[in-house]
Image (tube, rainbow, N blue to C red):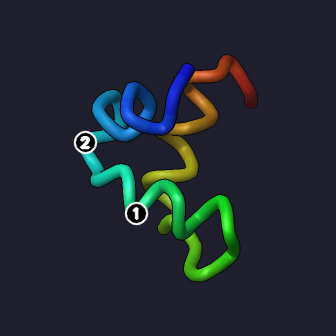
Amino acid sequence: MTQEELAGELNVTRQALSNWERDVNEPDLNMLKKICFLFGVN
C-alpha cells in the first residue's frame, strides 16, 4: 500500500501520513484506532 492509498483510506493528506512516519508529529488516538483496524491489529 502506498502513502497515497493509505492517506486516502484514512482521509488525511499524504503529507500528514509522511509526518507521522518521520516522527514530525503523531496521529491522535482515533486515527490510531483507524490505522489498527485497517491493518487488522488489536
Are the residues flagged by discs 1 and 2 in contact, CB closer than 8 Å?
Answer: no
Q: As displayed, is residue 42 above or below residue 7?
A: above
Q: Is residue 19 left or right of residue 6?
A: right
What percent of the width, then of the height, locates residue 11?
25, 42
Q: As displayed, is residue 23 above or below residue 33?
A: below
What percent of the width, then of the height, locates residue 38?
54, 23
Please name the amino acid that badge 2 sits on: Asn
* Residue 16 badge: 1
Q: Which numbered disc flags the more N-terminal residue, 1 or 2?
A: 2
Q: As displayed, is residue 15 above or below residue 41?
A: below
* Residue 11 badge: 2
In this rendering, the count of numbered labels is: 2
Please tell me which residue is depicted at 63% across the width and 34% down the height of the picture: 36
Quadrant containing the C terminus is: top right
Element assignment for label 2: loop
Nearer the observer, disc 1 or disc 2? 1
Q: Is residue 5 left or right of residue 22?
A: left
Quadrant containing the N terminus is: top right
Q: Nearer the viewer, residue 35 or 22?
A: 22
Q: Nearer the viewer, residue 14 or 31?
A: 14
Please name the amino acid that badge 1 sits on: Ala
User: Seen from this angle, which residue lies furthest right?
Assistant: 42
* Residue 2 badge: none
The crowding category of the residue bearing disc 1, from other C-alpha atoms within 10 Å (few below 14, some 14 to 19, many at least 20), is some
User: Seen from this angle, which residue lies furthest bottom?
Assistant: 24
Please tell me which residue is depicted at 58% across the width and 73% down the height of the picture: 26
What percent of the width, then of the height, locates residue 9?
34, 28
